[in-house]
Image: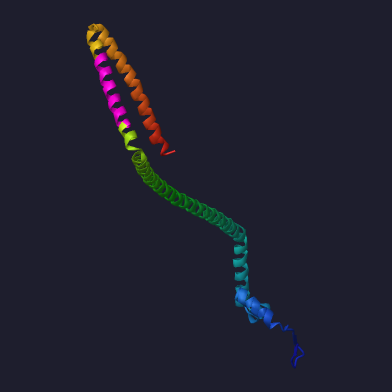
């Protein structure tokens, strides 16, 4: 409170921090406010301009900040969806890569197993031949001579049988020969198909 010689009183509250805060927000200092109170038209006009400007901003604030708020939420949704996509795609890519690696390893194992099986089979066949030869060498000479004699007689009997059948075949009529030939073809063909099926079955068993 200030008192002059004519006994006039001017009241000025001491709140420097508050007025500094007001000035930082509005651009209007304490002295301008006091001058406006004292009738300074320029100071009053500054405060009036501030009011008009802020009322305009206030009328736009709801729409502006509402749009900004909606935009930020929309951006958040986009980022969230993109993040889910990236994580999901990354996981799927890792799974596919693992499957690719597993298939390569499985295929390599199949190749190695086939190779080992073939080597083992070749070894078994060689062992069987060696065992067979050993068994033959262990037989007495007389026994081996009898085996050779049996083989010779078997061959001779087959030749005799063939000559006999061939002779009878030539004595048949042309029509009967054709029937007989067709019968042999059918019989041999069935056996061939049977042998072919067995061969295919054996090959197929290698890959089961």
Q: Is residue 9 left or right of residue 100?
A: right
Dominant SS type (magenta)? helix
Q: How many marks?
A: 0
- Is residue 162 within the magenta segment? yes
Q: Residue most toward the right?
A: 7
Camera-nearest residue between 191 and 106: 191
Q: Is residue 109 left or right of residue 59?
A: left
Give coordinates of residue 137: x percent, y percent. Answer: 33, 41
Camera-nearest residue between 73 and 36: 73
The structure's colour scheme is rainbow
Task: For residue 16, say whether it is visible.
Answer: yes
Task: Tell me where residue 193 sits by quadrant.
Answer: top left
Task: Tell me where residue 9 sits by quadrant.
Answer: bottom right
Q: Is residue 160 left or right of residue 13?
A: left
Q: What residue sits 37% from the left and 32% below the top?
A: 200
- Is residue 201 within the magenta segment? no
Q: What residue sits 64% from the left and 82% below the top?
A: 31
**188, above or below 25, in the image:** above
Q: What residue sits 27% from the left and 7% below the top?
A: 176
Classify the position of the C terminus by image quarter. Answer: top left
Give coordinates of residue 30: x percent, y percent. Answer: 65, 80
Q: Which residues are magenta?
A: 146-165
Camera-nearest residue between 37 and 72: 72
**193, above or below 43, in the image:** above
**42, above or below 76, in the image:** below
Give coordinates of residue 108: x percent, y percent. Answer: 40, 49
Give coordinates of residue 151: x percent, y percent. Answer: 30, 28
Task: For residue 38, say whether it is visible.
Answer: no
Q: Is residue 191 left or right of residue 162?
A: right
């Amino acid at each position: 409170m200030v008192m002059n010689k004519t006994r006039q009183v001017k009241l000025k509250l001491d709140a420097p921090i508050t007025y500094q805060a007001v000035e930082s927000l509005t651009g209007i200092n304490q002295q301008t406010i006091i001058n406006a109170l004292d009738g300074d038209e320029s100071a009053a006009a500054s405060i009036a301009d501030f009011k008009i400007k802020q009322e305009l901003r206030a009328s736009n604030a709801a729409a502006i900040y509402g749009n900004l708020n909606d935009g930020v939420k929309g951006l958040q949704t986009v980022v969230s969806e993109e993040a889910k996509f990236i994580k999901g795609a990354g996981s799927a890519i890792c799974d596919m890569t693992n499957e690719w690696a597993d298939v390569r390893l499985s295929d390599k194992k199949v190749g190695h197993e086939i190779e080992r099986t073939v080597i083992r089979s070749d070894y078994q066949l060689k062992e069987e031949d060696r065992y067979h030869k050993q068994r033959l060498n262990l037989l007495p000479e007389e026994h081996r001579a009898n085996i050779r004699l049996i083989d010779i007689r078997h061959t001779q009997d087959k030749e005799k049988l063939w000559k006999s059948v061939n002779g009878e075949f030539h004595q048949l009529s042309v029509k009967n020969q054709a029937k007989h030939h067709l019968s042999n073809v059918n019989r041999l063909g069935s056996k061939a198909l049977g042998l072919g099926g067995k061969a295919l079955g054996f090959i197929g068993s290698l890959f089961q």
